Amino acid sequence: MRVRGRGEVELDLPAPTSPSGRAVDHELRHAAAVVLSADPDAAGIANADDRLGRPAALGVRIRRATRDVLLSRASWHYGLRLALCIGLAQALVSLISVPRSYWVALTVVFVLKPDFGSVFSRAVQRAFGTALGLVVAAAAWRSWSGGGGTYR
């Protein structure tokens, strides 16, 4: 066995003659590279799911998710955009008297998602759903109150 530059390992093994022999040869070379490398996780070996499709250990998945959320540029952009939109919504609510003003901020959170493409369609769908709910509620109120518009 000889170690070449950049963690490459040259093993003196017989040439494989079958598919299973090639698989064993590949795995032995990979194992030797991991063991002899200065940083075994340089290629993300400890963070990767295994070859059988089983997920990595819980601690590894938590570290991976935390790193992705805290260091991702897209996460920071989304967080700043969400904070700005909620701040603007709350500023408008303070200027205009709204009975249950917390719904404005909740609507911003529900409608504003990390991808820009569907924000407009979600906003239109939310407005359409609100208007449709208002029409249905008015019709129900009218039928229950006997057409007079007041509840008996």
Image: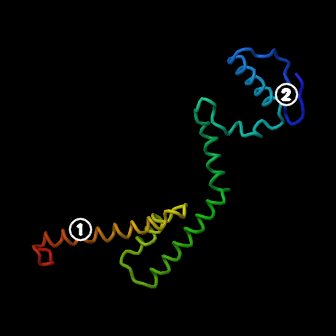
Residue 8: quarter of image: top right
Could you classify mark 1 by the number of other residues whose Cα lies within 10 Å: few (under 14), some (14-19), or many (20 or more)? few
Who is closer to the viewer here, 70 or 54?
Answer: 54
x, y (%) of residue 74? 63, 60
Who is closer to the viewer here, 102 or 129?
Answer: 129
Q: Relative to residue 97, is residue 131 depicted above or below? A: above
- Amino acid type at circle 1 is Val
Report whether 132 appears left or right of 75.
Answer: left
- Tell me, for residue 9, which label it has, or none: 2
Q: Relative to residue 9, is residue 74 depicted above or below? A: below
Residue at the disc numbered 1: 136
Q: Relative to residue 39, is residue 103 depicted above or below? A: below
- Amino acid type at circle 2 is Val
Who is closer to the viewer here, 17 or 70?
Answer: 17
Quadrant for the C terminus in the image? bottom left
x, y (%) of residue 124? 41, 69
Could you classify mark 2 by the number of other residues whose Cα lies within 10 Å: few (under 14), some (14-19), or many (20 or more)? some
**Comes first in the chain, label 2 or label 1:** 2
